[in-house]
Image (cartoon, rainbow, N blue to C red):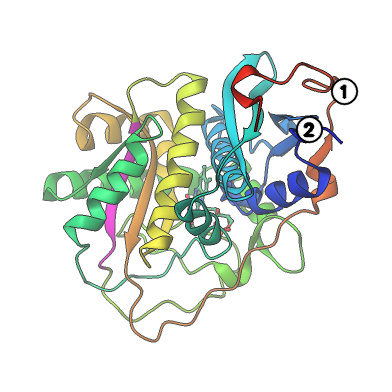
Amino acid sequence: MDQYLPDAYTVRAAIALAVRAPSVHNTQPWDWRFSGRTAELRADAGRHLRNTDPDGRDLLVSCGCVLHHFAVAAAALGWAARIERLPEPGVLARIVLVPHDTRDGDIALAAAIPRRRSDRRRFAGRPLLVRDEVFLAKSATDHGALLRFLDAPSQLSALTGAAVAAQELHRADADYGTELATWSGRRYSPDGVPAQNAVQAVASAPRVRDFADAQLADTAESDGAVLTVLATRNDEPADRIRAGEAAGAVLLTATRLNLASCLITEPLELTSTRGLVRDCVLGGALEPQLVVRIGYLPEGAAPLPATPRRPIGEVLRPLAHPYGVGLPVPAELRGR
Ligand SMILES: Cc1cc2nc3c(=O)[nH]c(=O)nc-3n(C[C@H](O)[C@H](O)[C@H](O)COP(=O)(O)O)c2cc1C
């Protein structure tokens, strides 16, 4: 075997860790192919939520999350991911794996992947440490996005207003309701939002979506979550993928800091309410991609079960064209 190629077990292990990434309604809308030293990531169009996510933002953001987690997993296994985004139509990313000296930080970040959960419960009223806010913001900028912490009352009430308006518009949309009921309230399913991971939505705060058959008991706190908006300068497909990568980084950083977190996108799925967030929360200068709730769980809060994932065999296939196999070893790798 070529000593510069990752073996099949390594690639499978990296994908198995990567697919723990969050995705809208746990649709896991990704399609991975691998050969030689090259992976390709495509969106699985059959898993696009057309009524929840009409412009496909959540689909691309979800794929960006799994792309980020793949790079983190590969680094922990001794391979650096060189990523080319949107290399050709239909391919979201082409990733070439090159040997990498794994560092402690790579392993710590990869270890956070299976510990992360979307936690939709109310958080304790304890402010984040300034140092932790700096780490979280840096994890977003390192991936080409910006994490804005909302502290002005006007920003918070504008976000709440947009979230409540989006919920009302969605409640009146029968197709949206059917899609939500189909993809949530699940039991014994390899995808979708399980009933045991959903809490009842509260209309007055931008907390969670109104998932079907919510079974998770909320905490008794008055919600002390810190609200942030993850934004990009532009809103092209590549920006949405990068926003997903940045979201993956922010969530794993939060997990490492023992902070609970959850993504919220309902107010960003409708043009009108997304416009409110862009203009009234971000001052019109940035493109909102995700809302991220971050905070401390109250003392004694029960651990959340992990959500299920599809079998690896369904999401990982061989690449039709064996990029990399038989090609000369790149100059920078010779002699290693
Ligand atoms: C693009 C995107 C949008 C999401 N939107 C919401 C949301 O509006 N409300 C919510 O409670 N969770 C949201 N989530 C979280 C998913 O429901 C969650 O990742 C999925 O159910 C898997 O669970 P896990 O994150 O605990 O592994 C979103 C995740 C992504 C990636």
- Residue 263 position within the rendered picture, expressed as x and y whole percent measured from the top left: 44, 51
Count the marks: 2
Q: Main secondary structure of the magenta part?
A: strand
Which numbered disc covers residue 33?
A: 2
- Residue 124 position within the rendered picture, expressed as x and y whole percent measured from the top left: 28, 74
Q: To which residue does mark 1 refer?
A: 320
Name the residue furthest bottom. Answer: 300
Quadrant location of residue 325?
A: top right
Q: Is residue 109 left or right of residue 329?
A: left
- Badge 2 crowding class, 10 Å Cα cut-off, few under 14, some 14 to 19, many 20 or more, is some
Q: Is residue 27 left or right of residue 207?
A: right
- Residue 227 position within the rendered picture, expressed as x and y whole percent measured from the top left: 28, 53
Residue 160 seen from this side: no
Q: In the rendered image of this protein, does residue 224 appear above or below residue 86?
A: below
The amino acid sitting under disc 1 is Ala
Q: Does the CB distance between marks 2 and 1 fall below 8 Å?
A: yes
* Magenta region: 224-231
Q: Secondary structure at mark 1?
A: loop
Q: Residue at x 67, y 46 (%)?
A: 28
Residue 103 seen from this side: yes
On-image quarter of the C terminus:
top right
Q: Residue at x 47, y 56 (%)?
A: 104
Q: Residue at x 36, y 35 (%)?
A: 142
The amino acid sitting under disc 2 is Arg
Mark 2 and mark 1: Cα distance apart in space: 8 Å
Name the residue furthest top. Answer: 88
Q: Is residue 160 left or right of residue 21?
A: left
Q: Residue at x 78, y 32 (%)?
A: 33
- Badge 1 crowding class, 10 Å Cα cut-off, few under 14, some 14 to 19, many 20 or more, is few
